[in-house]
Amino acid sequence: MILKPQNVVVPDAMHERSQALATDASALDIAISQEHPPAGVSLSAQADFPSRSVTLVLPPRRAPRRRAVRARNALASKKPLKVMKFGGTSVGDACCIEKTLEIVRGSLGDYRVLVVVSAMAGVTDLLLEAAMCAAAGDSETVARIFKSLKARHRSTANALIGSAAKRGRLNRQLKECFVEGESLCQELLLTRSLTAAARDLISSLGERLSAPLVATALTEVGVKSEAVDARECLVTDSHHGAANPSFELTRGRCERRLRPLLQKEIVPVVTGFLGATAEGALTTLGRGGSDYSASILGVVLDAQEVIIWTDVNGFLTSDPRLVAEASTIPQISYQHAAALAYFGAKVLHPKTLQPVIQRGIPVWIRNTFAPEQAGTKITLHGPHSDVSVKALAAMSDIQMIAVTVSGMEESSSVTHRAFAAVAAARSDILMTAQTRSTCELGFVVRSPLAERTMEALQMEFGSDADRRYIREIGVKNGVALVTVVGQHLRDLPGIAEQAFAVLCREKLQVIASSQGASDCNLSFVVAAEDMERTLGVLHKEFQLDGVSNFR
Ligand code: ADP
Ligand code: ASP
Ligand code: MG
């Protein structure tokens, strides 16, 4: 190393120490670093305190050090980015969080990693229960819920964080969240009304608790990490409970807030599920929305891939809780995975794939508790395969609203007006069914939307003139929707026939079906008590239980 003598001006108080340091180039390098000068050292003359000039032998300027930092940053920014989302069970307790930490740490050599976390399993449900109880005046239950949430988060923090200083800092962060939650509930106890905005504020607390917990636990295992509240970077509209992101604003915020952390190889741990309007009001993306948070952030930060870490070995051919023989699908297309999610496969939030489709970013579903398993890769085209039926999905929390018309001649105008009415009510229709013989028109909706849909139809057909030919507007409860997802379902002859034949053979009654409406999904409304057996029979019929790389 070439050493050059240089004159610097230091305060009197530093003179002796500087002379001593002058003999030690490496110490000097630290002592007068421009980035972090020790208190009192100046590289230029200052008039406001007594100072003396000393000649120091310095390593050549600061350039090599800055160059090294820049080179390190450049290298870091060349590392591809993985966005990893960890669901509720993956952060459910200290043992689960340890698995999560291991996965993140193990990926850091070759990748930059951005973590998105859900609330600890069950916490969002409890927070919503607390909010509803508060609005109903039940202060005892509210207190009990907060007591248990505090105990759970504190004991997890204590199990994971050894350093007293870090634990103290974390506990202060957790306390702030609890204070906010409890005072929000106090307000609800007084006002007795739960607005959508207040619901969002309370239900988001779970993620705002888990993010600092996971970030601190990462630092404890030697990974540089920082918790980030998604209000700082994920901008949405003001549709509380199901907010839509603004990609443009989110991209700008992420470049400012998250990119610098990633470049410094600090792992941001971002709260899933929530965001904020441009004006700063907290919003949520909908239940299970952390998956969606991960894909939004993956797109705006140009991630190489998004990985949804959960508690099963990938996207399976059916919900394993309902079909024990369900097997992992190694690869599946965005279209088929999105259809399965839309029709009830809880493993993925239905909107998750929307942002990544245009960019072609692969999304993986992997098991936090079995990271050696490859999981499922979701891509634009999926596997090259002739297999028609890929998987099944099911939903039990649905209702079918049926409009019965008495005169054949009126039915086409009824159809037209009924569709317009449910569209105006923003009711998301999963399936419609129409029979000419009985003049019945059925709308299948998720249960929370049933009341709204029913009201819209009753308003539309409430006049005396209409009552002459609308025989009934009724709700069919106790039904479930089973959906077959695959390719060429309409165009290939035989798939629907095969499904109907086996259900008939097994004496499983189909109440309504969407046959012929789509090439990629075929839905059946069945009695709720038949749902599990219908799934099992179809799963076997379409041979979905053998693990196949060609599915
Ligand atoms: P997380 O908390 O990790 O977000 P979720 O509970 O939201 O996890 O989703 C995972 C669950 O989704 C699984 O435990 C499984 O029971 C359920 N599930 C439903 N359908 C499927 C499917 N086709 N493949 C895999 N899991 C499914
Ligand atoms: N914690 C939220 C929920 O339970 C979001 C999520 O887990 O993805 O819905
Ligand atoms: Mg989920």
Image (cartoon, rainbow, N blue to C red):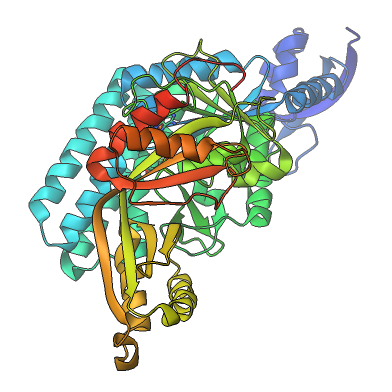
Q: Where is residue 279 in the image (x, y as percent from the top left)?
A: 53, 65
Residue 428 versus residue 21: which sits nearer the camera?
A: 428
Tell me the quarter of the image containing the N terminus: top right
Q: Where is residue 318 in the image (x, y as percent from the top left)?
A: 42, 29
Q: Where is residue 532 in the image (x, y as percent from the top left)?
A: 29, 33
Q: Residue at the location (28% across, 22% down)?
A: 158
Which residue is the extreme one toward the bottom? Answer: 464
Residue 320 figure quarter: top left
Up the image or down, 131 lies above or below 28; here it is below
Tell me the quarter of the image containing the C terminus: top right
Residue 122 figure quarter: top left
Up the image or down, 429 lies above or below 491; here it is below
Left or right: 447 with respect to 299? left
Residue 19 versus residue 127: which sits nearer the camera?
A: 127
Up the image or down, 327 lies above or below 537; here it is above
- Count of numbered circles on the image: 0
Q: Residue at the location (34% across, 38% down)?
A: 504
Q: Residue at the location (32% across, 90% down)?
A: 463
Residue 117 in sight: no
Which residue is the extreme one toward the left? Answer: 140
Residue 6 in sight: yes
Q: Position of residue 325 (x, y in %)?
A: 37, 19
Left or right: 488 with respect to 165? right
Residue 241 figure quarter: bottom left
Left or right: 16 with respect to 181? right
Residue 512 versus residue 459: which sits nearer the camera?
A: 512
Up the image or down, 401 lies above or below 416; here it is above
Q: Residue at the location (49% across, 27% down)?
A: 315
